[in-house]
Image (cartoon, rainbow, N blue to C red):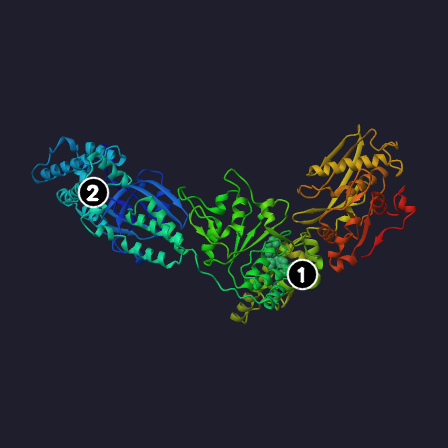
Amino acid sequence: MTSDGAIQIPRRLPLLLTHEGVLLPGSTVRFSVDSPRNMHLVSQRLLKGTSLKSTIIGVIPNTRDPEHDTDDLPTLHKIGTAGIAVQVVGSNWPKPHYTLLITGLCRFSVSSLLKERPFLLAEVEQLDKLDQYTTPATEGVTAENGELGELSQKFYQAAVQLLGMLDVSVPVVAKFRRLLDSLPRETLPDVVASMIRTSNAEKLQVLDAVSLEERFKKALPLLTRQIEGLKLLQKTRKISPDNEKKVLTVRKGGVFPGRQFSLDGEDEDEDGDDTTALEKKVHGANMPEAALKVCLKELKRLKKMPQSMPEYALTRNYLDLMVELPWSKSTKDCLDIQAARTLLDNDHYAMDKLKRRVLEYLAVRQLKTSLKGPILCFVGPPGVGKTSVGRSIARTLGREFHRIALGGVCDQSDIRGHRRTYVGSMPGRIINGLKTVGVNNPVFLLDEVDKLGKSLQGDPAAALLEVLDPEQNHSFTDHYLNVAFDLSQVLFIATANTTATIPPALLDRMEVLQVPGYTQEERVEIAHRHLIPKQLEQHGLTPQQLHIPHDTTVDIISRYTREAGVRTLERKIGAICRAVAVKVAEGHTVLKSEAEHPTQQGDKAAVPEMPIVIDHIALKDILGPPLFDMEVSERLTLPGVALGLAWTPLGGEIMFVEASRMDGDGQLTLTGQLGDVMKESAHLAISWLRTNAKTYQLTNMMGGPDPLEGTDIHLHFPAGAVTKDGPSAGVTIVTCLASLFSGRLVRSDVAMTGEITLRGLVLPVGGIKDKVLAAHRAGVKCVILPKRNEKDLEELPANVRTDLDFVTARNLDEVLNTAFDGGFPGTASTHTHPQLTSKL
Ligand code: ADP
């Protein structure tokens, strides 16, 4: 723009090609753009630029049918409108696009095209000389008399007449009046043509009219038509003009009335093709009555809406989703229990109990197809194959599989969608999932139901309940859809790490199947049967190129991983494959260059011998120094350390309990991410030891009979930032403190778990299998556990049972007696009972 206020557009303009309507100078139009060229224009020009000039772009109508739009450049319309982009809004749904609000400034013609990519850039010539438009419309004609003057006078009067027929309290009418009062007359044809009901073709004619005279001539009949249409409407309605005005304007939601009276039929048909196609799809989507009714209603609304209205896109998206949903599309179940058994066995090693239950579940389904049974919920540490079993179930049934991650979901609209009145509203994950799979009977895996959050936006668990409840889910209503969708054919499976945090109402609907961690041996088998072949294939290697011997696998498992599942193990194997893939590829290139230059001496040593065998040295080279050493024996070299076993949602863990004492006045300090129950256990342990100090010959630092006298105690539970709750550390704390107070070492190969009472009894605890597996992993030889947990040992794999000694204890006496070499002084059992060691 020049300093005197006249608009001067840049000589070089980026061009926006649009199908959607025509921008006339003086009007503001919303465009939705998604073609690559237009997207580049927005992202590289509009969003990057900082000056006012950079927001000026040329809008050129593209008359080619959008359906047949290709990447080729269409022939450009000769005249376009330069405009200022006053607003840019980006969205990714349902596909990436921008919505631009552009205010037209003036016409231009394209002199030459400078660039076609990434967006169009053209040299342009400005056609409207805006600085010459000077006369405010109200002051009549001054400069131009003659035909132009007459025309503009006529036009102005007609516009005033139209205004007189409308209700000024409607904002758009008020705006019209303001414009009429303040704008130069020369701009009226453009402004009025963009405000009254005109088709794109008519607007295009107005745009093409470069000379003012012609422009008035083109626009005047449109204005007259609008007035006649209104008059006709008033007559047919036979109501008082006052009321009628309101009816007219309100009925049209502020848009100028007269559509049904527009004189040209072309207008209605303009996007007719598009909507007829959509209508056909709506009828073909096989949706239930209620949904069809809603769709037809929306379709009717859509037909009446100008495309530039933001609501047009919303309604369009809604209808597109409705026709895409699999209302009655389903896959046919092909369930053969024998085949299912083979498939499950082939896909997964071990996990017999789980596989058995899954087969039972499938067998029942086969017998009773309309099964309204419980929802299976696999609970176990990460990486034990929960998702993978879910996927296998889908395969055995011949169904589509879709995973819905629920971790961190804390808004119920994530499940049930947003109402369409929200900006950026979307359907929820269930409906989205159905759209993705395209059938109404998929297997949905609801991953991590234990990690659902809660927030002000409503409780997602409640929404999920509705999804899972067989009594309700045949008419599940997503807020976005606002019509019921039948979910009863969907097979839901849930997974979780722990049942503790699953909302109780939800847990009630599910049948929990525990998937415990694997033993070392199972892990080795899984590695060789499944993980190694899978990783080899993923890295384009063959067993002839890479061999991982049994010993190496054991080494990877014990020295580079410490987990209940096999995910890290799989990752480590992946790392080995990558390293080997590089070697193999290098080998190829060396061989090739030798072939090309046979005379040149290639470095023979660079060609590795196949298969590349991963031994301990290679392992260290690839994975680095071992992450875990057998630390157990090293750490139990001082009095005041004992080895406990803890359960976490990630599987069992060994846990060192350390204690130290110093001069003080009987204070107890506890550190290391403790839950409340743990603190209580510590107090219990100390009280019991003080009570029995005499029997066990426990003393304070000076040798006094009360271990706490003049002494402060510090108990610490190192390892990990996991909150250690649960009472099961009781026996470990007692053992640790007994060691501290007696100055004796705890046996370095013993780990223990059990709750204690004030009277020294040992009570049963949970998670025995996971805990024992963790002890086994860590190389412990003997495990002390509560007597009443003896039955849990039956669940353990045979090899673990033979590798470990189990001592089942009824009271602390028995615990201490086992935990210290040669028994503990004062324990009754040293003298009376034989040691309760059993090899189960
Ligand atoms: P989760 O869902 O329990 O966290 P995944 O199902 O993602 O675990 O399993 C992680 C990886 O381990 C997958 O590649 C899976 O195939 C593999 N896996 C786990 N358990 C077994 C098993 N018993 N047999 C074969 N592969 C397994």
**Residue named by callout 2:** 193
Residue 535 visible, this angle: no
- Label 2 secondary element: helix
| Side of 165 where 102 appears, left or right | right
At 54% from the left and 63% from the top, the residue drawn is 397
Label 1 within 8 A of ligand 1 by Cβ: no
**Residue 382: horizontal and vertical position, in percent?**
62, 52
**Residue named by callout 1:** 352
Q: Quadrant of the N terminus?
A: top left
Q: Quadrant of the C terminus?
A: bottom right
At 74% from the left and 36% from the top, the residue drawn is 680
Upstream in the sequence, badge 1 or badge 2? 2
The one nearer the camera, 41 or 649, is 649
Q: How many marks?
A: 2
Given the image, on which type of amino acid does mark 2 rest?
A: Ala
**Residue 158: horizontal and vertical position, in percent?**
14, 38
